[in-house]
Amino acid sequence: MTREQKPWFLVEVKKADTDVSPSLGYMQKQIRAEHAFQVVIDEPYVNRNCFDIRTPVAVPARTFLSQLL
């Protein structure tokens, strides 16, 4: 996803794996995206702002999607 024509965030989707993929961090560094998320479908909602985190992070799909509005 881009913002003002610059990479803003990357998303990798997993069904249940909460171990952040090393390739996600590698790609974040390569394209200099501000955020990198491993969105996990089977995880329950947590009340936190995932956009406060600058390093690659696993985040529940419900949490991530609620913050895109």
Image: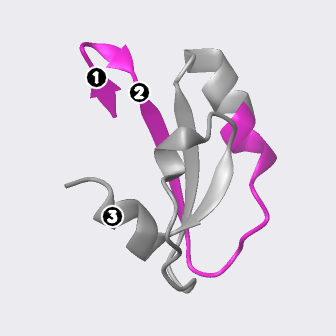
SS category of the residue bearing label 2: loop
Report the residue at 68% width, 21% height from top.
Answer: 29
Residue shown at 79%/65% (left/top)?
19
Determine if the magenta segment contains residue 23: yes
Residue 3 % position (x, y)? 28, 22
Query: Which of the two discs, 1 and 3, labels the residue nearer the N terminus?
Result: 1
Image marks 3 and 2: residues in contact by CB distance under 8 Å: no
Kindly report the distance in space between the C-alpha atoms of the residues bearing marks 1 and 3.
17 Å
Residue that label 3 marks:
65
| Image mark for residue 8 | 2
Specify the quadrant that holds the C terminus: bottom left
Which residue is tagged 1?
3
Q: Are the residues tagged 1 and 2 within 8 Å (C-beta)?
A: yes
| Between 29 and 35, the one nearer to me in the picture | 35
Q: Tag 1: Cα neighbours inside 10 Å, few (<14), some, or many (≥20)? A: few
Q: Residues within 10 Å of mark 3 (few under 14, many from 20)?
A: few
Specify the segment rendered in magenta.
1-25
Which of the 4 image quadrants contains residue 55?
top right
Which residue appears at 34% of the width and 34% of the height?
1
Q: Which amino acid does label 2 sit on?
A: Trp
Q: What residue type is labelled 3?
A: Leu
Instruction: Kindly identify the amino acid type of the residue bearing the numbered disc 1.
Output: Arg
Instruction: Tell me the quarter of the picture where residue 36 sits.
Output: top right
